[in-house]
Image (tube, coloured by chain):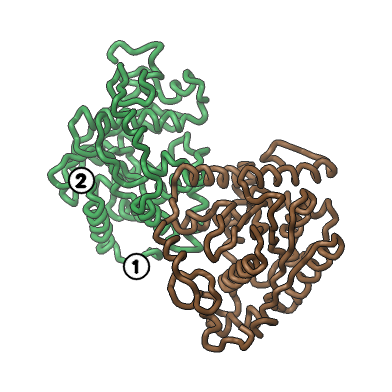
Chain colours: A brown, B green
């Protein structure tokens, strides 16, 4: 790890990374061992490595896999789910499955066509659907926190994109812990300071089998574009991603990008009449609007 | 200009750019036609184009060239000065010359060696010396504003570098107008929204002869590194630099990066005992410290 000026053998590495994650969880007060954590699991290396580490550290976890019916030529969702299920079964961990085609009779790609977002790039729709379903599951299950496996490469790329747009709303909410609020589960990112290759090395050395393919829709993602730029910087200036992210957290602490109170207040009062989750508009939330013209019977 | 979705012939272009600059000067209240503006002139395309435009628009200007004695193999400073002098003479404009070797008996490179900054990369020293001498000249001459020809490419690159470091102090001072304060001249950047190639095209079409060489020390500059990244983004997303800069100004207006009052207060009270310019330390300012062990007689 050039950014840490540190080289480790496999055995020590498998101790070192969980210790790093533990320190981050405690320093940022993400959650405690008395709390129940719902882990968003995709079947990829990051989420399985995170789940493995949280379990090894003694946290109370349950996994949640969201099946969006992405089946473009490679059976992406079905295969990802199998990796997640196999991982959970081998370790005796509990995994819930939520299926979009099961509950709403539509795959993500079909939804993208119907809502005229284009079949080729349903990424924003995917984010909307997953945020909604994860939040709902965490609330319904009474979990104390919802953990996602966003790694440092993800966070740095998202942060760079939001910075290039100077999106104050997003910049005010980029910290690794978003506290619970009425209608919102606490959201935490225990891997926010873990490089993608650190996560991959861990998964590999632990013998975790993960879904090797990228989502077939991700090729055009802007995030991948910013990641490649950041990889160049990291190559020339080891630690660039980590400094960028750490300094951003310091800037947040120093009061840059205060969260708008009006916005929080507005969300506090308004609820979607269909699902009960908070919404800025006062009407149906963005998720329920997708299905408003033809709400499924079991909805 | 892909970012403006606009194509112009030479004649209209030579009207369009000054009109854009005029609108920016007025919108940002940089200075008025009743005020006296000191223009920092390097002999390069940007500063000569800026001076040309301000003069054509009817502003009261005087140029200031700072000779740092940069003479690495190509007589950089001497040749740059000649371009500035020729430009001024042809138009009957007034140009002051301040010479570092003349007043302090040392070139920038010699200074860099003596202060152990390394002969190869005196860029930070150059910035320090020029900021000091420009400010002193503006104050001594009683000018209302000191104008530099930083263009959009410069500003976007500096902003990106400061953002990657989340340098709140710099981010709070990136606007195109820094008001005058005790000991500080008002500093303005009328070209802050002008792309480098727009400035170059203007200088070329106006028949301005400018110093064609880059500073021999600039090759390793980080700014050039960030510029090249931004050029790639601009290529793929026309207008990327302009959006980045505009959105940053909006974020500033919205209250991101408030300037620290303590810092402003501290500067307000403390003066360098040698030159009288403000200083954060209470002792000699950073410029005078360089010469403290051996102050020249005429200093």
Q: The numbered mark 2 sits on a residue in which chain?
A: B
Of the pair A137 and A235, the residue shown nearer to us: A137
Measure the alpha-carbon separation of dots 1 and 2.
28 Å
* Residue under the point 74% across and 67% down: A213
* Residue under the point 76% across and 42% down: A16
Where disc 2 sits, the SS reads loop
Nearer to us of marks 1 and 2 is 2
Q: The numbered mark 1 sits on a residue in which chain?
A: B
Where disc 1 sits, the SS reads loop
x%, y% of residue B9? 30, 65
Of the pair B285 and B148, the residue shown nearer to us: B285
- Answer left or right for A230 relative to B291: right
Is residue A286 visible in the rendered image? The answer is: yes
Quarter of the picture containing the N terminus of chain B is bottom left
x%, y% of residue A153? 63, 53
Q: Are marks 1 and 2 in contact (CB under 8 Å)?
A: no
* Residue under the point 29% across and 44% down: B177
Of the pair A92 and B4, the residue shown nearer to us: A92
x%, y% of residue B293? 41, 11
Q: Residues within 10 Å of mark 1 (few under 14, many from 20)?
A: few
Name the residue carrying label 1. Answer: B6
Name the residue carrying label 2. Answer: B31
Q: Are marks 1 and 2 on the same chain?
A: yes
Of the pair A51 and A8, the residue shown nearer to us: A51
Vertical position of residue B7 compared to residue B198: above or below: below
Q: Residues within 10 Å of mark 2 (few under 14, many from 20)?
A: many
x%, y% of residue A239? 63, 42
Quarter of the picture containing the C terminus of chain B is top left
Q: Earlier in the sequence, mark 1 or mark 2?
A: 1
* Residue under the point 64% across and 69% down: A140
């Amino acid at each position: 790890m050039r950014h840490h000026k540190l080289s480790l053998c496999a055995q020590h590495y498998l101790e070192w990374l969980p210790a790093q994650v533990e320190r981050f969880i405690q320093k940022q007060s993400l959650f405690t061992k008395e709390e129940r954590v719902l882990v968003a699991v995709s079947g990829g290396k990051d989420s399985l490595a995170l789940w493995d580490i949280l379990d090894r550290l003694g946290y109370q976890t349950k996994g949640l896999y969201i099946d969006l019916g992405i089946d473009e030529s490679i059976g992406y969702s079905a295969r990802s789910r199998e990796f997640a299920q196999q991982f959970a079964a081998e370790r005796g961990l509990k995994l819930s499955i939520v299926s979009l085609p099961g509950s709403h009779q539509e795959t993500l790609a079909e939804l993208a066509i119907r809502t005229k977002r284009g079949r080729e790039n349903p990424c924003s729709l995917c984010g909307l659907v997953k945020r909604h379903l994860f939040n709902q599951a965490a609330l319904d299950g009474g979990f104390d926190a919802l953990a996602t496996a966003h790694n440092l490469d993800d966070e740095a790329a998202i942060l760079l994109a939001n910075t290039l747009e100077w999106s104050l709303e997003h910049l005010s909410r980029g910290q690794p812990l978003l506290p619970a609020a009425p209608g919102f589960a606490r959201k935490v990112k225990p891997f926010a300071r873990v490089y993608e290759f650190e996560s991959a090395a861990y998964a590999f050395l632990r013998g975790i089998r993960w879904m090797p393919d990228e989502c077939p829709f991700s090729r055009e993602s802007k995030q991948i574009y910013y990641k490649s730029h950041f990889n160049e910087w990291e190559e020339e200036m080891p630690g660039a991603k980590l400094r960028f992210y750490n300094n951003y957290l310091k800037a947040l602490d120093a009061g840059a990008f205060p969260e708008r109170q009006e916005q929080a207040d507005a969300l506090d009062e308004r609820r979607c009449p269909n699902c009960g989750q908070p919404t800025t508009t006062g009407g149906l939330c963005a998720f329920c609007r997708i299905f408003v013209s033809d709400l499924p019977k079991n909805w």
